[in-house]
Image (cartoon, helix red, strand yellow):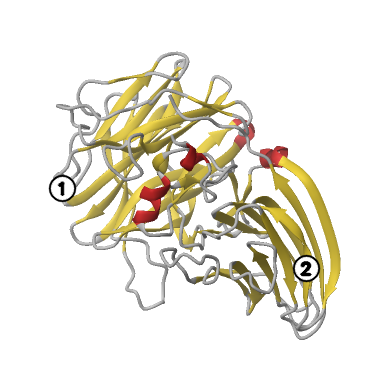
Amino acid sequence: MTDDRIRDPHLPEVHLRPPANWINDPNGLVHHDGWYHVFFQHNPQAPTHDRVHWGHYRSRDLLRWEPQPIALAPELGRPDEDGCFSGNAVSHNGRITAFYSAHRVGRPWQPVAAADSGPDGSTFVKRPGLVVPDPPAGVTTFRDPYVWRDGDRWRMLVGAGYADGDGAALAYSSPDLADWAFDGPLHRRADPAPDGSALRTGEAWECPQLAVYDDGRALLLTSAWYQRTGPSHVVAWAGQRDGEGFRFGATSRFDYGPDFYAAALMPAPGGRWLLWGWSWEAREESCAKEAGWAGVLTVPREVTLRPDGSPHQAPARELDGLRTRTWQRAMRAQPGAESVLGSISSAADIRVRLGFGRDPAWGLRIMCGEGGAGDLDFLDLEIGDGSLTVDRGHASTDARAHVGAYRMPLPELAPGAELELRIILDHSIAEIFSGTGEALTLRFYPARSDTWTVVSRGLASDAVEVTVTAHGLRTPGAAAPA
């Protein structure tokens, strides 16, 4: 790591990632011996996706993260010689067992491999051979195991794509984490035609994850992947336990932003389900090579279920422990008026409460500078027509940064309604949550990184009651993995 990389104005401070080089999927999220363990796809040599390892952090409180040695590394002559791809981990008999995808160039599918830790969960020994050496007949894409305890047995999902174009989460079971039997698809579906009539779910499903709640309801998450274009978005499937299996019904997009993928679940103490995702870079690869880093994990989210079984997301409550200075402004936003609410640092937690009249519309602009007339960098959030639209088209003066506007539905938006939003900003990433549990994640790359300005914009035809509370966020102090 060089000084240039440390000073990169776009490098997040609050979000978990090593200070240099490549990171993608969160892996092996497990609570073991009083520690939260987060593993992740990592190239420790370059900011590119090549010969990927498993990096590793651990924390007692989800705030202060301790770097651990590289957990898994590719080895010449082994099935994983070109990469230790994604998977998960479980805590059992005082150790962590990691299940991962063994990658070799030229092989379009990845068999399942495993490794066991010592008692401290920091160093791993790979098992000889493969846990699941081959995919079932007709399966052309096969990777990303997810293992959990279900009663008196262990169960595993593996993401898959069939030759006929169906995506699937394939199910396996084992009495001992060693010998696994194929039980058929847990869930399988063809990708809908792109005519707008249904949410697209992928030609293949990556990173399948399953949360089973105490009342028997379940949430299946799959990451939609396409042969021509690669990773796309995360799909949520509302489910219910049904005997030895599960029934799945309605689908929804798990995160409405363009830069969220590979969601991974952690069963946490107290019956909570925590989740991290990967937010990739939204700029040309040359930018990452110049900066010396690429990718970031989202903040930890707590995932609960609404009455209809769809997911409700919010930042984990522990993040409140990172707050520093605070300001609050309450006002009536008049039609057509713009008002400066205050200044924030580029790592901030903003909470918005709105009370609408006849017209449920309003805008928030983050001016990524001092907010003067010549300031061209800004991120726009606009509420109207039953949704929130986030526009990063003017958020960077660098032509290599991606642009676009992205819409998140607000199902309870109506005349006379109240609405809450929460916005986590961290240099080059924004995670936006509605009070009703929707989320939108995107990346942006402003020219300035010190002081930003928050502006209210009156977009409604009548006045809107606005209360904005802004907190600075301190750096939790994670260091580079060993």
Q: Residue furthest top?
A: 119
Query: Which residue position is annotated with label 1?
Result: 137
Above or below: residue 331 compared with residue 57:
below
Q: Secondary structure at mark 1?
A: loop
224 shown above or below 199: above
> Label 1: few (<14), some or many (≥20) within 10 Å?
few
Left or right for 44, reference 34: left
Q: At which x and y percent is residue 396?
A: 52, 65
Q: Residue at x 22, y 32 (%)?
A: 80
Q: Which structural element holds mark 2?
A: strand
> In which quadrant of the rendered image does the N terminus lie?
top left
| x and y, in percent, of residue 7 in the image | 53, 43
Q: Looking at this view, is 380 or 270 the one in front?
A: 380
Compare marks 2 and 1 and give the one earlier in the sequence.
Answer: 1
Looking at this view, is 291 or 189 the one in front?
Answer: 291
Quadrant housing residue 357: bottom right
**Image x and y of residue 246, in percent:** 43, 48
Between marks 2 and 1 in the image, the one whose residue lies nearer the viewer: 2
The residues bearing labels 2 and 1 have C-alpha atoms spaced at a distance of: 61 Å
Res 228 quadrant in image: bottom left
Name the kind of residue labelled 2 in the image.
Val
Is residue 49 something that shows in the picture? yes
Q: Which residue appears at 58% of the width and 52% of the height?
A: 427
Quadrant of image for the C terminus? top left
Horizontal relation, residue 163 to residue 451: left or right = left
| Nearer to me, 479 or 36 | 479
Horizontally, residue 36 falls left or right of residue 316, namely: left
Q: Which disc number belongs to residue 101? A: none
Give the mark count.
Answer: 2
For label 2, the residue is 340
Residue 232: x, y in percent? 37, 60
- What type is the residue that disc 1 sits on? Ala
